[in-house]
Amino acid sequence: MTVDWQGWSAWILAISGLIGAVSAVFLNRRGQDQQTIQTKAANDLAERAQGFDEMKEIVGSLRAEISRIEQGRDRDQAAQARRCRSTLDHFVLAFTTLQGQVVSEAAKQAAEAAHVDVEMHLSEDHPPVLGEAT
Amino acid sequence: MPTRVRREALTRAVQANEMTQRAKWYLAVASCRHLLTGIIALALPGTFKSTSFLPILEAAPLWFWACIFIGAGLACGTAAITGHEAIARLGMAWSATSTLVVGIALTMSVFSGQLASPTGPILWLAVAFKDFVVCAQPIRSPFEGLAQRLAEKQQTK
């Protein structure tokens, strides 16, 4: 099958060029939007990753403080410290889950709820000792 | 380094990352393709005597197509060197459109019996659609900058 394009080639190519240019502009805008979304996501992930480092330091210092109290002579305070360690372990478990599912909003909420539990426990149980530690 | 300062430094690095190496190389290759085609069209017009180029040459003279290709090549090359995003997007759009037009012209040649093999238009149209795909992608990937920063941070520990 042969087709005679004589006289039509200029029109066909002009229309093709126009459609191509419009498509390219549309796709370029889409690419820019995608870039903006990815930049926001990258910043969010960077902040969360930074938060993980800070939280690890806090957990480490709390554990050290609990160990110090547990080794002390005051039995009442040692018992409180053991309960505190149990609550801290619960928080660390939720925190580890959050690290594994960094983009999951549900995991973030679960970790925040566990963090609130820890704060309540600390404030109700023995705030002066752990308050000094942090 | 204080925590707040570290966080600000990390965030600033993510926002200010440069064009990806992949995008720069793609633009450089596209620039070479267009510049060579345009320069050959200007300097050696006799190489375009094949009947497959008749639809292109009927639509516009060869020097016009040469200017189109050289323009696309200059835009892509400038973007590859400077990393300027707006010029890169202009160059990619220019490249995709001009390649598409030539691909369609060669396809017309196949149907008019002026070009025996369809492999030429297949390749030109494939390259054109590849350019369109690149247009729809981020030219600056923030994740590459972030990954680089985190890798550097781990190496310094």
Image (tube, coloured by chain):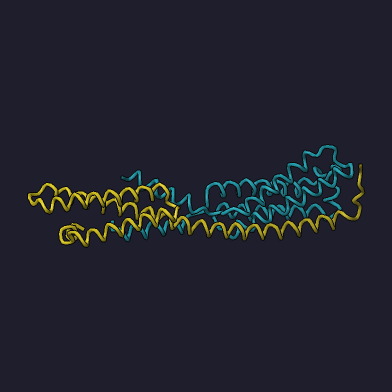
Chain colours: A yellow, B cyan
Q: Is residue A68 left or right of residue B89?
A: left
- Front-most of residues B26 and A47: A47
Q: Is residue B45 left or right of residue A3?
A: left
Q: Residue B39: where, in percent of width, then height?
A: 72, 48
Total tally of numbered discs in the picture: 0
At horizontal 76% and vertical 42% (from top left) the residue drawn is B122
At horizontal 71% and vertical 52% (from top left) the residue drawn is B69
Q: Identify the residue at the far left of this view.
A: A73
Residue B151 in which image quadrant: top left
Q: Quadrant of the C terminus of chain A?
A: bottom left
- Front-most of residues A32 and B82: A32
Q: Is residue B50 left or right of residue B5?
A: right
Q: Quadrant of the N terminus of chain A?
A: top right
- Front-most of residues B48 and B4: B4
Q: Residue A126: where, in percent of width, then height?
A: 17, 59
Q: Residue A6: where, in percent of width, then height?
A: 91, 52
Q: Residue B59: where, in percent of width, then height?
A: 84, 55
Q: Is residue B34 left or right of residue B88?
A: right
